[in-house]
Amino acid sequence: MQIAALRENNNETRVALSPECVKLFQKLDLEVLIEEGAGIKSGYPDELYRDLGAKIVSRKQSLNADICLCVKIPEIEDLDKLKERSALIGILNPYENKKYFEILKKRKIATCCMELIPRISRAQSMDVLSSQANLAGYRSVIDAAEQFGKAFPMMMTAAGRVNPAKVMVLGVGVAGLQAIATAKRLGAVVSATDVRAATKEQVESLGGKFIMVEDEEAEKTETSGGYAREMSEEYKKKQNQLISATIAKQDIVICTALIPGKKAPTLITKEMVESMAPGSVVVDLAVEVGGNCPLSKIGEIVFHNDIKIIGYANMPGRVAKDASALYSKNIFNFLSLLIDRDSKELLFDMEDEIVNAVVLTYEGKLRLGQFN
């Protein structure tokens, strides 16, 4: 069987198959194809893949592979050229890309949405959301530090003391935890908030101060999948009051709160931003799904009242080399589950909890009812 990594469209800098994983895929008895130029934006030239035994091919050849790997879903004209009954694996965003379902069903493509990998122990090595969010959290603090006009750590000098930066993280998922850890390593004083009480211990273990609304609803803030549940209007009001009082004292705010399949919740309002000191920085990691701050704009740094609101799209892509390497390994671990050791063919065992959760279209049918 042939497996191909497609060259991404538009501004996506990551690639779905890194050179480090070429030999791993070959051990699965797969012929590795790389579309010409697919890895260049990630710092992986074609020659590097070729030297490791991969074959550099055209767009047409890569789309004709038995298994196509992507980061983002290709355009509809490319989907129409996929080999019938082949497999497409990537971060396909089915919540926003329902317009592609018909062509995928028509060509009987088996589509695997890597962002739907369940959060269970057996699937941790396949969890692309975690691997990419980890890097996004790191990069958010680095970008904030670049835009912040002061130092992060406390410094004692003969000329006087430099006070440490105060950083607040909104949302304590994987990205939030890494943002806390990175800010602490840089010497900042860090606080964090989340609707899930279970994150308190994680925040404190990293040296941060945990801030949370405490009421009866706070005990039911997490879904069975480990994600934050959408809260009531009354809870949101209490949360806004708490965040507002805290944000006014912060130098940097990192927003990371997401609800799968829904618009990101607004956590930091225009008035909260205006309460911050001049020169402060807000980083909105949720900008691509509506944003946690209404002032943020995709791909821009907005200046408001001398406050910088960073809305960079595709934060993991800002560390594309590492993001691609981790993403590729996630896919390899997932494919290892699908490829039958004896026949060397793809076997979609829908009785398997992981496979059942991620296969969107199969044999001309839409499998996952939540996307109807």
Image: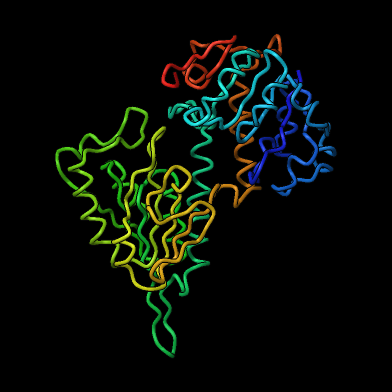
Is 36 on the left-hand or right-hand side of 205?
right
Q: Which quadrant of the view contains residue 280?
A: bottom left
| Residue at image coords 49%, 16% | 356
Is 181 on the left-hand or right-hand side of 325?
left
Percent of width and height locating residue 173: 39, 43
Residue found farthest to the bottom: 159
Count of number-bearing discs:
0
| Residue at image coords 38%, 53% | 293
| Residue at image coords 49%, 39% | 130
In the rendered image of this protein, does residue 308 appear above or below residue 298? Answer: below
Q: Which quadrant of the view contains residue 57?
A: top right
In the rendered image of this protein, does residue 180 appear above or below residue 158? Answer: above
Where is the N terminus found, in terms of image quarters? top right
- Identify the colour scheme used: rainbow
Where is the C terminus found, in terms of image quarters? top left
In the rendered image of this protein, does residue 333 appear above or below residue 295? Answer: above
Question: Looking at this view, is 294 or 207 the one in front?
Answer: 294
Question: Looking at this view, is 287 or 171 the one in front?
Answer: 287
| Residue at image coords 62%, 23% | 335
Percent of width and height locating residue 266: 33, 48
Residue found farthest to the left: 216
Percent of width and height locating residue 308: 44, 65
In the rendered image of this protein, does residue 166 appear above or below residue 35? Answer: below
Percent of width and height locating residue 287: 45, 48
Question: Looking at this view, is 11 or 196 the one in front?
Answer: 11
